[in-house]
Amino acid sequence: MKKIKFTWTIGIAAISIILVIFFGFRKDEQPPNFIFFLVDDLGWSDVGCYGSDYYETPNIDRLAEEGMKFTNAYATCCVCSPTRASILTGKYPGRLHITTAIPIEGWKRLGGKTPLKGADYVKNLPLEEITIAEALKKVGYATASIGKWHVCDEPEYFPEYQGFDINVAGDGHGATKNYFYPYHNRWRMTKNYPWIEWNTLPNGKPGEYLTDRLTEEALNFIEQNKDQPFFLYLSHYAVHTPIQAKENIIKKYKEKTIDKEKGHTNAAYAAMIESVDQSLGKLINKLKELDLAKNTIIIFTSDNGGNGRITSNYPLRGNKGNFYEGGIRVPLIIKWHGVTKSASQCNTPVICTDFYPTMLEMANLPAMPEQHMDGVSIVPLLNNNGALGRDAIYWHFPNYIGAGHPNPARPCGVIRYNDWKLIESFEDGSLELYYLKNDMKEEKDLSNEMPEKAKELQGMLEKWRDRVHVQMPKNNPAFEIN
């Protein structure tokens, strides 16, 4: 497989060099740097500029004041691995067959007592995929993946084999066991991992906090590459469980009035969010110090909705682990100096497959439609110069979440078509229909009142699944209805 990847990479590199000569970076300006700031499990309303009165996020809020805030931004899944694979490739999870968290098999966790067997899925992001890191690296970008990776189950698929010059703290694990040094990860032992405990980051100091350490690694990368274009993929483990934070910050939130209506009440979680906010602030200050702020594009987002056992995605229904809006709608802020209007807001639906083609266009590089085939560039939205020419986005989940989240997802398909949203159950064919423009809380299921509209959207879903060649769950012969 590595040989295939190597040969393909050489060919693409040669083509890319030729393309850059003819269509590449504009001679009158330096290629932009990119900071992709990804937070794990951050809910749609978990930051101040999206409505929280309890969590304090002054740096994130300032980013929104200086850039564009998206109100209808989506992850491609309600759990992490599929979304991360989509960010890196520009493809839907259904096309990649990376459709649930790696290596979890939810239907087995449920004891196999389900009408369907969860579909088989790919547990390593294929090396044949040309990631956004590879696309940028081929034209001279320094690239770093710092933090959580979690799109593989085997070491030969780590970031350093997917276009990143540097990999700090990234492997197949989905969480750290401890946010304070030593960080030892969750127990794991497979034929592919020669260790039982994985140390998220070595060579730390007692009391060191993981979010701070990853930030320092990111600052060092920026400093070391200040004289060339860089792509920093800073993928924090926070605010994923375990919920652990600095005691002095926790104390501050314990003394605050909690936001019971919005469900933002957890002081330790609030402190984790504040540490993430401080991380962003330190990066922005470093850019200013090095005179890089005007030429660095910052993309801030989350990989899925907030954990319903810890926070609330108010006013949205649902949470991480299901496909109601609270599970898949995420905060997204993009600052592009000289292009995005300060304090602007975009209500057009966008999804994380769009980042890949958007970044290429931002860098004045040719599109790679054979790679990011499910994404579209959102530059027309960022420069307020047109629409996307797309009216539907899709989700495919042929698996089971298992336990661990309120109302966990079961096999389903989802489409958002303009302001309509349909959820189709693969277990019994039942449909849920919502009109999000008037019902963002998804309180009124219109499927019985408007069966023709529901069938129309179901037909669109079926046609899309055929085009994308998704994998489907199969009947479980062992299932018995009690």
Image (cartoon, rainbow, N blue to C red):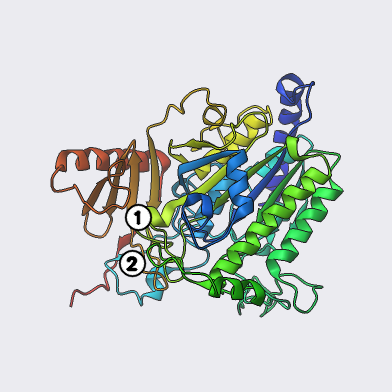
Residue 139, position in %: x, y? 76, 34
Quarter of the image that includes the C terminus: bottom left
Which residue appears at 36% of the width and 66% of the height?
Answer: 408
> Residue at the left extreme?
449
Residue nearest the viewer, comparing 33 with 354: 33
Residue nearest the viewer, comparing 257 with 155: 257
Categorize mark 1 by other alpha carbons within 10 Å: few (<14), some (14-19), many (20+): many
Which residue appears at 41% of the width and 75% of the height?
Answer: 109
Mark 1 in CB contact with mark 2 (< 8 angstroms): yes
Give the quadrant of residue 131: top right
Residue 469 seen in the figure: yes
Residue 205, position in %: x, y? 80, 76
Q: In what element is the residue under mark 1?
A: loop
**Residue type indicated by callout 1:** Tyr
Residue 8 seen in the figure: no
Residue 85, position in %: x, y? 56, 51
Give the quadrant of residue 342: top right
Q: In this view, does 344 lie to the left or right of 246?
A: left
**Residue type indicated by callout 2:** Asn
For the image, the number of numbered tags is: 2
Q: In this view, does 191 lie to the left or right of 206?
A: left
Q: In what element is the residue under mark 2?
A: loop
Q: Name the residue under label 1.
A: 324
Position of 260 relative to 395 (above/below): below
Q: Is residue 221 left or right of residue 50?
A: right
Upstream in sequence: badge 1 or badge 2 = 1
Q: Name the residue under label 2.
A: 407
Which residue appears at 61% of the width and 53% of the height?
Answer: 58
Q: In this view, does 430 lie to the left or right of 198?
A: left
Residue nearest the viewer, comparing 280 with 78: 280
